[in-house]
Amino acid sequence: MSTFISGLAPHIQGLLDLKHAMGLPYNTSERHLVSFDEMCARDFPTAPTLTREMAMAWVVKHPAEHVNGQLKRVTSIRQLAKHMASLGIEAYIIPTGVPGRRVHYRPHIFSHQELRALFVAADAIKASPIGGQRQLIIPVVFRMIYCLGLRPGEARRLHRHDVDLARGSVLIRESKGHKDRMLFMSADLQKYCRHYDTAISPFHPDRIPFFPNHQGHFYSNAIPDCWFHELLSAAGPLIAASPESPPRPYDLRHAHVIELINRWVRAGRNPEALVAYLSLHLGHSNTEDTWYYFHLAADFHPDLRGLANATIESMFPEAHHEIR
């Protein structure tokens, strides 16, 4: 549990207590609230409530920060202000529209050649000078994201005992939607993970994370992005990246789903009969997020519309991006 130190400490803790009582992990927002609390304690030590000056100081964009990340930071503080106002406490609520609109990302769908280049780069990764065994971890973590269609955070937070190397099963605990789900590895991936476990265990024999950092703890949220950018740089021109929408680790999940849909549609399977299965596989709380992938598959592979069931277009709801 975080310890808050600013004048807003009881209100921040009250908001977290409420969210946790509702069954929401609220982890990302809690990290933002911790940082906001530290800023308030440092820059506004005597402020008894959330003022406009405090809120707008928080809104200021960080160097190299994407507007979507900025929006997430701002949303956490807006929710805090609304929580305080609901209790009759004066608080400045950051107006809707500040700092701007969310940018809808255009996923990068990797070709087989690009995936090969990415994993060749992963297999050639060097050890870190500060310790740890990232040269063992990086090739495995991104293969698991792609081969199982995991969200990057799901892979990063895997516990050692969530990965049953005998059965080939992977338990995803309380991810988006706060539901557990079970996935099964292919024989090749299962064998690959066994080799990894054998190699990493001498360094961290009693580890809890499946992918431990140099201290044996879970990696931070930003690390997979850093690793991924390193792989993209190593792969160089072999990956045709768009400057407006550069590839992200999450795009490996997209690539996994598109590959599944390609196989199903070309085999003459009915997408309507498969969407419920795909929702469970991906951990979606509703099928609307899943239908988005059928739009995406058709966008990148127009021939799929002709190969699919003739009524597929009428079954598509309006496409939108999955909220991550």
Image (spheres, rainbow, N blue to C red):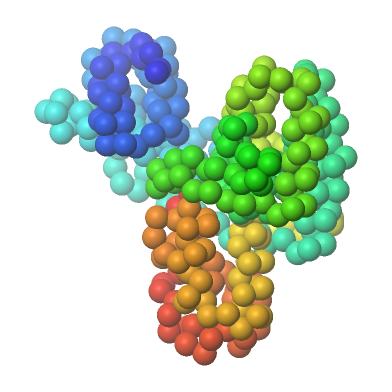
Residue 43 pos. (x, y %): 40, 14
Q: Nearer the viewer, residue 194 or 36?
A: 194
Judged left or right of residue 84, residue 106 is right
Location of residue 106 by image quarter: bottom right
Judged left or right of residue 194, residue 179 is left
Does the image show residue 64? no
Judged left or right of residue 219, residue 290 is left
Q: Residue at x 74, y 49 (%)?
A: 189
Q: Residue at x 81, y 49 (%)?
A: 119
Q: Nearer the viewer, residue 246 or 109?
A: 109
Residue closest to the far front: 166
Q: Residue at x 49, y 64 (%)?
A: 277
Q: Residue at x 31, y 46 (%)?
A: 96
Tally the numbered discs: 0
Residue 170 pos. (x, y %): 59, 44
Location of residue 234 by image quarter: top right
Does the image show residue 56? yes
Residue 47 pos. (x, y %): 27, 14
